[in-house]
Image (cartoon, rainbow, N blue to C red):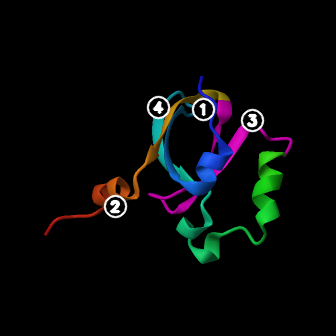
Amino acid sequence: MTEINYELLQSNVVEVTFIKKNGEKRIMNSTLQMALIPEEMRPKQKEVIEKTINSKESHLVKVFDVDAQGWRSFIKDTVQNYKVICPWDLWASNSTTG
């Protein structure tokens, strides 16, 4: 399994491939970068993210799913792969042509 880096999540959108509890493979565009999280969905304090990282549930990675526009989590040990997504790639995959 691959270890995910929190600093990477705090400054980028990261495409994470992991295995869900039901055994399905899932690919999610994830971030902890505050500028990419709608203001009304941001944690009230920066410490919230730091507490999440250092909590008893540290086997869980809690991230913002930029496609679903909501908070999600996955188990660290189920990460198979991850890569930084260029903002242009993310925009292009979500846009439609007329």
Q: Amino acid at mark 2?
A: Trp
- For the N terminus, give its image quadrant: top right
- Across and down, in percent, residue 59 comes to 75, 35
Give the labeled residue for mark 1: 21
Residue 54 shown in magenta: no
Residue occupied by mark 2: 91
Q: Amino acid at mark 4?
A: Lys
Given the current orientation, which residue lies at the most extreme bottom position? 40
Would residue 77 be visible to someone looking at this image? yes
Instruction: Judge whether 80 appears above or below 6 on screen.
Output: above
Q: What distance separates the C-alpha of mark 2 from that of mark 4?
A: 23 Å
Residue under numbered circle 4: 25
Between disc 4 and disc 3, whose residue precedes? 4
As measured in the structure, the alpha-carbon distance from the residue carrying label 4 to the one carrying label 3 is 18 Å
The spot of residue 95 in percent (x, y) is 27, 63
User: Residue drawn at (53%, 66%), measured in percent from left and top?
Assistant: 36
Q: Are marks 3 and 2 in contact (CB under 8 Å)?
A: no
Residue occupied by mark 3: 59
Q: CA distance from mark 2 to mark 1?
A: 29 Å
Mark 3 / mark 2, whichever is N-terminal: 3
Classify 10 Å Cα crowding around label 3: few (below 14), some (14-19), many (20 and above). Answer: some
Q: Is residue 70 magenta?
A: yes
